Every structure is written in C-alpha cells, then in structure tokens.
Amino acid sequence: MAKEAVVAALDLGGTNARLALVSQEGEILSRWEWATATMPDQNTLVSTLVADLAASQEKAQELGVEIKGMGLGVAGRVLPQEGRVDFSPNIPALNDCPLVPRLKSHFPWPLFLENDANLFALGEYWLGAGVGHPQMLGITLGTGVGGGLILNGSLWSGSAGTSGEIGHMTVDPDGKRCHCGNRGCLETWASGFWAVDWAKEQLAQSASSWLRELYDKDPEAITGETLVVAARQGDPLARRAFVRVGTALGLAIANTVHLLGISRVVIGGRFARAWEVFEIPLQEELYRRLTLFPREALSVVLAKLGDDAGMIGAARLAWDRVGE
C-alpha cells in the first residue's frame, strides 16, 4: 500500500526558522521551530538545516508518510533556478550561498527555493485571504517592505531573482536614500525601520508624544513594536507615523493596480498589526489615485495565516513543482 505523500516546507527568517510536513490539502502534520540567531556562519547554518531536515524525514517515517519534495523560503534576493541565495539582509550567513546544492546531496527528494515574500503571497492565495483571487498582490510590513505577485493563479517569479518588489517602488522621488540605494522607496515610508526613524526625528524636534520619556531615556528603545502599541493606544505621534504608512501604501497599490489589474491586495507582517490605524489613510489615498480601475473590483485586506503564511507558501511551491 502506497504511503500518503507530503512535502516539507521551510520558512527561514532572520529570527526564527519554521519547518513543517504538509499534506496536499495544506494540513500541517508536524512542525518545528528554532532560532536562526544561533547560526552565525554558513557552514553552521547548513549543518543545522541538514540535521533538522533529517529529523523531519524520521518523523515522516514515524507518521507513515513519504516526503515528495521541499519548498524553502528565504528573505532577500534569491536565484530559484540555481538554488542560490545571492543576498539575505536578515541572515548574513546566507549571502552568496548555494543553498539547494549544499542540501540536496543529503536527501532523496527535490528542493525548491524562493523569496519569502513571494511565498507569503502564495500561501495567502492558497489557504488565506487571497483565496479565489487569481490576480493578487501580497505585501509584508516588517523591518522592510516585501511583496509577491499572483498572476493568473500562479506565482510570478520574474527574471534575475527579482519580482513583486513593491517595497522598492518609488513613492517620493526626492525622499530619503533607501538601503537599496534608491531614493524615496515605499520602504522608506511604510516599513518598521523607517517609521521609527521618522518618529525619532520628530521627537528630536520636540514633537508631542507619550513616547517622549522613553525617547529621552534611550532612543534605541523605540522599535516598530513600540510604535504599533502606541498607535493602537492613541498616541498622536505614532498615529501620524501610520498615516504616512497608509498614504504611501495607497499610492503604491494604486500604481500596481493600474499596471496589472489586481483584484485583491493582502497585507501582513508584524508591522501591519496597526491596520486599524492606517487602513483609512490607505483607502483614502488609494481611491483618490485609482482613476482607471473600478473601485468595487478591488479589495485590500489583512492576511489570515499569520506567521505560517510563508511556510504554507513553501509547501504550495513544492506541491506545484512536484506536480510539474
């Protein structure tokens, strides 16, 4: 009797790695999580992954299932065809890492690599807030701003390892220089890092805020999470920061919808937990600029899968590739 087929799915983040065995219907049969901060160099990281994937293989045997393939998601610029991570801002040990070639010699199943924001979009399209929307944009708000595109029901990977990078769409041509080298990227308005940077600038100029005492004691104590909590509690400065977030997102989404005819935008990530603060300025800016697309044909919603979105997307990637 044939064993039930499953895939392994790995979401490799800057803080944690999440690994799961996932059925063809998207059910998580078993899962693991560990800190990536304990893997300071490439050899240690790869050795840790080999050990954990071997454990997942043992668990599959224990469950009486068979792993048919594996999807891997990594933040940064990845080259899926080569199975190589070119640059990973959150995991420096992965820079210029031939990750798939280094792993595949240890396992009998194929491995498939993709950018983590692309897999966020794929996961939400499969089992989350994007179900039923074959033209979809996924946006992740965290330290930076990531994006992934679903076009005609399939993940759009583009060429040269880059696609869906809405975080580096220009929304302010004379704005601040982004870490990518461009000026005025969406990320410099809508990410946790740059929103905190703006808030600190305002506090240095004596802006009124409940964060004043914290800033005076230790400016570094103000983080993206601090801003989220303060905004949800009504702090005027934090709420102004999220008005900027929403306005910039509305502009970038309008540009994308005009170009691609997207019907659903799904926003997730930890910085998006202030959704109730920035939703209205986002909608106002979006519909002010959305002149050639019927507003009733577009919806912008919060993600549903939480921290599992990237892992679920990695599983869907593996199932799609195995099916091919």
Image (spheres, rainbow, N blue to C red):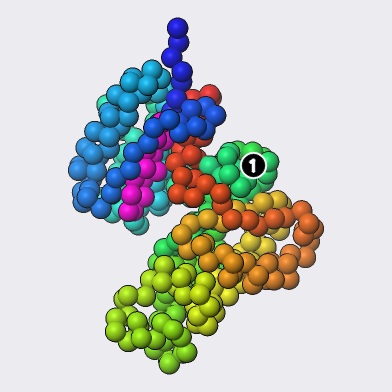
Quarter of image, res 81: top left
Q: Quadrant of the N terminus?
A: top left
Q: Residue at x 65, y 70 (%)?
A: 280
Q: What element carries label 1?
A: loop
Magenta span includes 15: yes
- Work out whether residue 125 or residue 275 is closer to the camera in this orientation and state it: 275
Q: Is the magenta stretch mostly helix, strand or loop?
A: strand
Residue 10 at what x, y percent from top left? 39, 39
- Which residue ends up furthest to the front in the rendered image? 233
- Which residue ends up furthest to the bottom in the rendered image? 206
Q: Which residue is drawn at 33% across and 43% down?
A: 33
The residue under label 1 is 131
- Work out whether residue 156 or residue 220 is closer to the camera in this orientation and state it: 220
Q: Is residue 62 in view? A: yes
Magenta-drawn segment: 9-21
Magenta span includes 296: no
Q: Give the amino acid type for the residue marked by disc 1 in the picture.
A: Val
Residue 258 position (above or below residue 243): above
